[in-house]
Image (cartoon, rainbow, N blue to C red):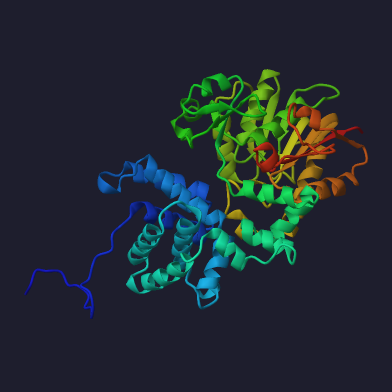
Amino acid sequence: MSDQPRRPRTSGKPYRRPKKDPVRILAFEALRAVDERDAYANLVLPPLLRKAREKEGPEKFDARDAALATELVYGTLRRQGTYDAVLSACVDRPLGEVDPPVLDVLGLGAHQLLGTRIPTHAAVSATVELARVVLGDGRAKFVNAVLRKVAQHDLDGWLERVAPPYDEDPEDHLAVVHSHPRWVVSALWDSLGGGRAGIEDLMRADNERPEVTLVARPGRATAEELLEEDAAVPGDWSPYAVRLTEGGEPGAVAAVRDGRAGVQDEGSQLVALALANAPLDGPDRRWLDGCAGPGGKAALLGALAAQRGALLVASEKQTHRAGLVARALDGNPGPYQVIAADGTRPAWRPGSFDRVLVDVPCTGLGALRRRPEARWRRRPEDLEGFAPLQRGLLRTALESVRVGGVVGYATCSPHLAETRAVVADVLKQYPDTDLLDARPLLPGVPDLGEGPDVQLWPHLHGTDAMYLALIRRTG
């Protein structure tokens, strides 16, 4: 008997083992995790890259490999709506009838063809080889046929074919061209107040990869220390913000490893700073973060409170997230307490605090730059699910603050149903309150609107689309 391994019988060319491409295999694995486990790419990708860097031999990643894998994953997710429209024109059946793993491979191929400078031949051949490895020869032939159709036009050429004219259906045109669900386009447009230029600028910003932003936690680290890192520049608005301009690895920064600094969008920093600096009537000794997980704002608030000798209580309903808050606050220079408690059923007496922040759970439409898959997961009906919780948390916050104290209501969503509608509804039940003008508490930040609340925007401020309303109890 021969010692040679068996090979599949073929009627044509001799069998050839597919070439394994570690970069594209990793990108495919990340996309499958996002699809199958409802995971977020920003949580899935770092451990996969770390494992790839630790390997020995040809599968070990260098910096260029990591950059390409990251671009393939995030680019495919961000432009999924556009690529699906193109693929629908190239596939002879509804995309819903195509197996999800095949769609992921096709999406990776479409992004290489339409969204990168990878040469056409290399993009097709590399994706077909990936299909042979992860899908098998049969489905690889299907992938090859579809991608050859995709390669017949560039992105602009395809958009002329698959996007409806703006004059006929502006929302659907923008949805296809800028890869946002139609309902999200409509909601963002309403929040912006109309005008084509603004909504297109916003959606373009949503499709750009954001830089990593660090926060120096006062009393523990300084922005000057963080600026000693390679390719680090000051933030635009927060005195504690530093941006890593070349995709730097936060874990390589000593202050981040030690917990003296953290990764935090500048919009989130501005929300915490505005609450901390809002004018009070009376003492300033007890602060509450009523939705503290995973701990970024709590760590900054705790450090700011410590400078004034104030105590921060950080409350988080989910026990595992309360653990993350405790880790973020570990080493805080002043007094703090982390508790696992339901923010709508407070574990403290009414009127216990001078300052209260509730950064409420929401659709996350303000962070689509960082979590591009969220735009495809969310549905309009999700707003109805969040609404009672958001109102309940704001009511509890208003009851938890003393007369003369201040509440900050924040969301990482610009959707009017999660921002102004919530504040307006709840304040009808609390006539002894005043909306403070939050704009002066974000010094130097332009384009903050008519107030008194504040809506930040990626295309105007380079931040996530954070919303903030400041409310003082007057009786």
The answer to whether residue 334 is left or right of residue 415 is: left
Which quarter of the figure has residue 468?
top right
Q: Position of residue 429 (x, y in %)?
A: 90, 46
Q: Quadrant of the C terminus?
A: top right
Q: Residue at x 72, y 40 (%)?
A: 456
Direction from residue 128 to residue 319 in the image, left or right: right
Residue 41 is at least partly visible in this image: yes
Q: Is residue 432 left or right of residue 267?
A: right
Residue 275 locus on image (x, y percent)? 75, 30
Q: Is residue 179 left or right of residue 250?
A: right
Numbered disc total: 0
x%, y% of residue 43?
50, 47
361 vs 344, nearest the viewer: 361
For the N terminus, the image quarter is bottom left
Residue at 43% x, 68% y is: 148
379, above or below 67, in the image:
below
Residue pictured at 40% horizontal, 44% vertical: 66
**Residue shown at 68%/47% (left/top)?**
201
Return the residue found at the far left: 1
Q: Is residue 259 visible?
A: no
Give above or below for 197 relative to 167. above
Q: Residue furthest bottom?
A: 11
Between 179 and 385, the residue placed more toward the observer is: 179
